Image (tube, rainbow, N blue to C red):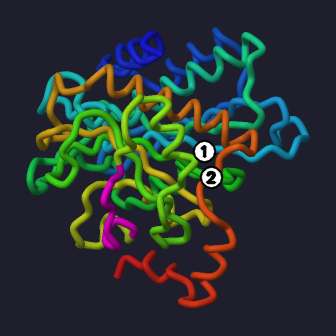
Amino acid sequence: MFQQVIRAHELLSDPHVTSERIVGIIREIGTYRVEVKEEKEIATTQFLKVWVPGRQGKSSGGDAPTLGVVGNLGGVGARPEIVGLVSDADGAITALSVLLKLITMHQCGDSIAGDVIVSTHICPQAPTIPHDPVPFMGNPTREALTKNQNYVDASMDAIVHVETSRGNRVINWRGFAITPTIKENYILRVSNDLMDIMQNVTGDVPRIVPLTTQDVTPVDNGLYHMNGLAQETMVSDAPIVGVALTGVVPVAGCATGASQTLDMEAAARFIVEVANAYTAGKCSFYDADEFLKITTLYGSMKHLRKSS
């Protein structure tokens, strides 16, 4: 998927990039349902959501499950303070790469079973914020919930969330890693099916992100968060798995020249394979019976969605 990654990288490197320009490129390939919503709060950003239909997807009257792919970030740039594409853009680059690959497959008649909804946002002028051990890119919206609500669609039966995750000291390997499944603010065990796909794609042992309870509370509640992985659990009951782009050493989200093409290509390829398997009913994010048992024993964890 190098072609798709390089194309997405170049598109988002443009300081004047807009969702409309990306939509224009999508329209050149085929006709797809697209939503663009602009938010003007701390900075202006455009949320982009694109539906790629599957052979037996809900959009065509079928019953195959729908996968959501969220490319999360603060912004693709921090202009005028910082010139160039920032490391934080990698979530959007990877998600757009997945989108470009899926619509190319669809046009070639190689569609997967179910629908896929890809969402991200485009902000070339996002703020930066202090964070330990390295600075983060800030959100262009005042409320983190604004992003989650724009990312998520009610028809998503499961969500893959991809994001740069190099600004910490607990993930210290190069490439990408996956989180345990998060459902309704429970951190569940890691999906064996997803680990199988990951080792097939990478030819290596699966790498797992060590999430904490703080990470499945609202990111703007004042608690320490490693990053924003799985924040969609604040607005969705669907099972969510984070895909973290990782590094051996901490790298600031506002650093330029830090995007790793090899890592994004592998992560994007993994997500395409997950979409293929999940929508065909060959991959499970969690054990439904076990989730029923844990909620019966210990109740709901949705109280973790409160910001205060």
Label 1 SS? strand
Give the residue type at disc 2: Ala
Q: Is residue 144 left or right of residue 111?
A: left
| Position of residue 56 in the picture relative to residue 295 (left or right) | right
- Look at the image and say whether residue 220 sits in the magenta stretch: no
Quadrant for residue 71, please give it.
top left
The numbered mark at residue 279 is none
Q: Which residue is mark 1?
A: 68
* Residue 89, quarter of the rendered image: top left
Q: Which residue is mark 2?
A: 158
In the picture, measured across the screen, residue 256 lies left or right of residue 71, that is left
CB of mark 2 within 8 Å of CB of mark 1?
A: yes
Which quadrant does the C terminus fall into?
bottom left
At x 48% / y 64%, what residue is drawn?
A: 189
Measured along the vertical axis of the image, is residue 65 above or below residue 97?
Answer: below
Residue sticking out furthest to the left: 133
x 37%, y 34%: residue: 204
Answer with the quarter of the image where residue 229 lies: bottom left
The residue at 34%/38% (across/down) is 176
- The magenta segment is 208-216
